[in-house]
Image (cartoon, rainbow, N blue to C red):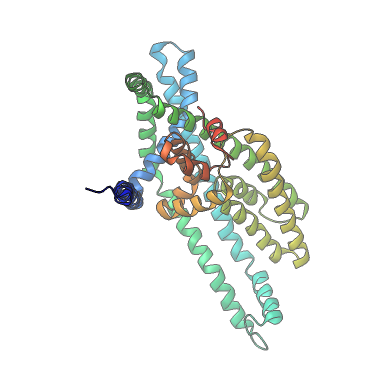
Amino acid sequence: MSYDPRTVETQASFPRTATGLLAIIATLLIVFMLRESVWVTGTLALAFFAALAVWPIDHWIQELVPAPLRWLGHAAALSIMLLVFFAFSAGLLYVVQQVAEGLTRYQEPLLALIQRVGRWVQFTGVEEGGAESSARLAERLIEPVIAVATTVMQSVWSLGGILTLLYFLVWLMLLEAPSFTAKLTAVASRHDDATLRQIIEATATRFRRYLVVRTVMGLATAALYVLWLWWWGLDFLLVWGLLAFMLNYIPTVGSIVAGALPVGLAFLQRDPASAVIIGAGLLLIEQFIGNYVDPKLQGRQLSISPFVVLAALMFWTWVWGLLGAILAVPMTLVITIAFSRIDALRPIALALSNAEDMEELKDVTAP
């Protein structure tokens, strides 16, 4: 029987092709499952990251108090978590309420702006006696915004059930943390492989660093926004400051929305030239925070490529909605760190990160 190397090569490539196809099918099934089970999987993911964020507080207090009082660590961690969620909910309600009320007050300036634009570019076709059509257009522009604001307010009020579930999930995760760590240690010692534990430790470290950096950047951005807009005498300073801070946790799109809304108000409250200058100032603030403050705070940490951040934001928003937008970067961090521990998937982790080679990827994903 003659030996044909092409036959052997074809037979060897078939398992690789089949494995690749199975991986693609499995990925699609996982994505479909995540999207269809958003209430379960999204809530579990949020609880996981919330537990990672508050666990150091829990652990620190438990180290300080006697064994019978270690429940104080859980109580303190859960109280801080609830305080943060309620503060964000209250801030969001305040912003939406102020925007909805302010739109009715600025209906006349919006009408005047539409008429000016209509005369310049014939957008509305207003010639003579077109004030009525401009008014209808102004109402049509305001009505969707008010409808969205009302929907957001109703959604915030309906978060009570989710927060209750989230509270118990985080509580159980904190209770199980010591035994879970022991189980990981036992598995790692048995199989001489601590990959899973390294992934969790690296994820926890990078996620807490990410939270600290985003919080500091959000506070700095909000303070600079308020100072700049106060200088120009714009209304709703507290609203713009809160928006700049809260939307800072949603990458890319959050900063665009936080900057576009006050600029839109500037076109209604001031002349176009001043509005353009205000917008340019806000853009400079974003560039300063993003290109100077962020690298200083991040240091030599795992960072995600800007293109990957935008793609992840689109993907996770499609999968989990607003919750996905908030968790887009943390979920991408988890995937990058996990893939960096698997030889076959390490090139994907390198592509997702800002690391330039495998050695740098290994350093920035270390626990």
Observer-nearest residue: 25 or 73? 25
Q: Quadrant of residue 292?
A: top right
Q: Judge whether 198 appears above or below 103 on screen.
A: above
Who's the residue at 50% across and 19% down the image?
60
Q: Is residue 236 visible?
A: yes
Residue at x 51% of width, y 29% of height: 366
**Whole-percent x and y of residue 97?**
55, 55
Toward the viewer: 133 or 353?
Answer: 353
Q: Name the residue at 65% across, 88% down.
A: 129
Farthest residue, direction front: 2
Residue 140 on image: x %, y %: 54, 73
Q: Is residue 117 left or right of residue 141?
A: right
Q: Is residue 53 visible?
A: no
Q: Residue furthest bottom?
A: 128
Q: Position of residue 170 (x, y in %)?
A: 39, 32
Nearest the camera: 151 or 217?
217
Comparing 20 with 351, the one in front is 20
* Residue found 70% across the figure and 65% down from its top: 267
